[in-house]
Amino acid sequence: MTQTTGKYTDFEGLRERAVALRREGLSRRQIRDRLFIDNNDILNRLLDGEPAPEWTKRPNAKDDLRDRARELRLQGWTYDQIQVELGCSKSSISLWVRDLPKPERKRTREEASAIARRGWEATLQHREEGRRKTRQAATEEIGALSGRELFLVGVGLYWSEGSKAKAHRRQERVDFVNSDPDMIQVYLEWLRLLGVTPERLRFHVQIHETADIAAAEKFWATLVGADPSQFGKTSLKKHNPKTNRKGVGADYHGCLLVRVPQGADLYRRIEGWWYGIVLSARGTDRQIRT
């Protein structure tokens, strides 16, 4: 048994506080962080006999589907029919109904194949709906950004995608290149936050020579709302016939380079901000709380 030494000497007092927090509805992780407990064995002993709050229990969202699948199977439905009806995978259906009698085959192979295709389409639609709901819920978690939050996001964004000085080439430029229009827009908002006026910026389109260059130039100019004089000569990437390139359809616009001229001082500040974030992160517990 683990000895209750050091900061855990007053075990009964600590247990009383832990149980009270548990009954208030806190999760194990929340209790651990609130009471500064870094020993899972101690935490287990503190909460021994205390049931978890309902909100921490993972519901089985498939219970209703399983019951319905068994009901349909008993009516003589095939896996394909059940899949079309419920939009779940055949593997799940198989697990749910494998102890039930197999219905007699009442259709040709062609008919069965057509049903199977419809079932797969239903499964794909069901999965995509799940993805959409997850993305939507995550989007709503962000809410409005404060100025400081945008500032920190921008520093990390630049240090990931922006140009950086090298020991062998101390070139302190503020150049940012990306193909994602949303990322470009967030970066431009960050520059505005720093006081970099839009008219100060310069832009260069970088694109594959076989793409629709004029359309790409128009796309980026519209996106950033800059004067044509702020755009330099477009850089073309040579075509390599050995490369199996994908994603070059109507949605392909190449990359946009955003440059802040005479940005050496700004670059040094960005570099300092980034290392400030690094030092802060190293000295703080950044574990995700649930």
Image (cartoon, rainbow, N blue to C red):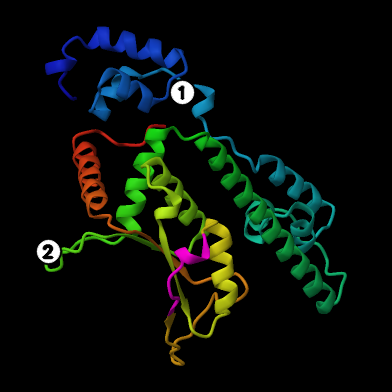
Quarter of the picture holding the C terminus: top left
Residue displayed at 37% across by 24% down = 30
In the rendered image of this protein, does residue 94 appear above or below residue 249? above
Residue 232 lies in the magenta stretch: yes
Residue 234 lies in the magenta stretch: yes
> Please, what is the three-letter code of the amino acid marked with disc 1?
Ala
Quarter of the picture holding the N terminus: top left
On the image, which quarter does residue 3 sit in?
Answer: top left
Q: Nearer the viewer, mark 1 or mark 2?
A: 2
149 or 80: nearer the eye? 149
Q: Under tag 1, what secondary structure?
A: loop
In the rendered image of this protein, does residue 133 appear above or below residue 117? above
* Disc 1 from disc 2: Cα separation: 54 Å
In the rendered image of this protein, does residue 124 appear above or below residue 12? below
123 or 270: nearer the eye? 270
The answer to whether residue 252 is visible is no
Q: Residue 52 carries which label?
A: 1
Highlighted magenta segment, given as a residue range: 227-235
Q: Residue 241: percent from the left, percent from the top?
A: 46, 92
Q: Is residue 24 left or right of residue 13?
A: right
The answer to whether residue 287 is visible is yes
Q: Which of marks 1 and 2 is nearer the N terminus?
A: 1
Q: Is residue 120 left or right of residue 162?
A: right
Q: In this view, does 115 lie to the left or right of 276?
A: right
